[in-house]
Image (cartoon, grey):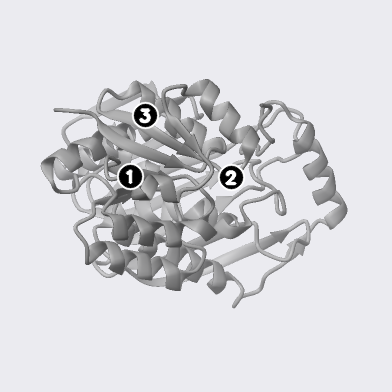
Amino acid sequence: MGSKKKIGLIGFGRMGAKYLHYLQACPDWEVAYICDVDENARNYAKKLSPNSTIVANEEEIFEDKNVDAVALCTLANFRHEQIQKAVKYGKHIISEKPIGDTLEREWKSVKAVENSGVLATVNLYLRNSWYHSKMKQYIKDGELGELAIIRVCHMTPGLAPGEGHEYEGPAFHDCGMHYVDIARWYAESEYKTWHSQGMRMWNYKDPWWIQCHGTFENGIVFDITQGFVYGQLAKEQTHLSYVDLIGTKGIVRMTHDFKTAVVDLHGINNTILTRLPFGGKNIDTMCNRFAKSINDGKLDPQLPTLRDSAIASEYAWKFFENSKEHDLPAIGNLETLELIREHRRNLKDGYGLLHRREF
């Protein structure tokens, strides 16, 4: 593919460390810089990547003409400004989602990138997964007839209210925008109508479980269920995650346990069960595709754009706010929520834990 692309990694928390791992394993990338304002994080970065230049000031990365791209792993309240800088200095962009802490800033970032020569993608990781690629290929092959119904569910005992990620929004935005995006990706159409039902679990101020159903402009129907409410204090924790695609002639569905994903096709020509490793956040696939995009001078069509991210963010917020327009019951109490938080603080292995890293 030619010489390695130099990338600056900005933000070295949980996701920043994941990016470093996969970028180091990719022959097309050289991690030239790692930036974090926290001294302990910088020391840890130096330990993991001794050949990278470790800095506290991101300006050093943007001003270095030898840097081809930046990976933005900071929280959402920093990303808009960093995207503007990347455009100014001509750096290609890999960003975590959402791309800003307000919709206004997200759309400003979209316009800035689209009016520049910079390539940019967002880690809407489901689009880079093997299982969704396989399921969409089955649709293209005609195994389902016409796609009619998209059903998505993701419920875990994950991030509890008040644990963090405030700039990313409540659960249905922070996590749910992945599922809002993948439903739109399957439908190949824009959202038209919707109705959301929420639950203020544990009497928390915001709904932490939402189910939204509605239609796309092309007539396809969807329902999306997301909530970090699934057995938070169960003796043995579990989860429920699936995507169910129903056509006029056949179906294909996917389930996973975060280790193995299973795609089950019942098509008009084939009945196929495929089990493969889940793949996590698919950062390796995204980084490989983005390196090729830079070499080709155009974004790989399999990669989501900043516009895709802004649309997913906007509709996740719309669906969230719509739940407040209907009966919004509250079951449970804040005392139980505090028990959950304490329980999660002591967990060594669990869903969506944000334990502070031991340096």
Secondary structure beneath dot 3 equals helix
Where, by quadrant of the figure, is residue 327 drawn?
bottom right
Where, by quadrant of the figure, is residue 37 drawn?
top right
Secondary structure beneath dot 1 equals loop
Res. 110 in view: yes
Q: Provide the residue designation for mark 3.
A: 23
Amino acid on which disc 1 is placed: Asp
Q: Residue at the location (39% across, 42% down)?
A: 125
Q: Depth check: give the residue in front, 237 or 267.
A: 237
Distance between mark 1 and mark 2 Cα atoms: 18 Å
State how many labels appear.
3
Q: Residue at the location (59% across, 54% down)?
A: 171
Amino acid on which disc 3 is placed: Leu
Secondary structure beneath dot 2 equals loop
Q: Provide the residue designation for mark 2.
A: 37
Q: Mark 2, residues whose alpha carbon is within 10 Å: few (<14), some, or many (≥20)? A: some
Q: Position of residue 178 (x, y in %)?
A: 43, 50
Q: Depth check: give the residue in front, 28 or 182.
A: 28
Q: Position of residue 272 (x, y in %)?
A: 27, 26
Distance between mark 2 and mark 3 Cα atoms: 21 Å
Res. 148 in view: no
Q: Nearer the viewer, mark 1 or mark 2?
A: 1
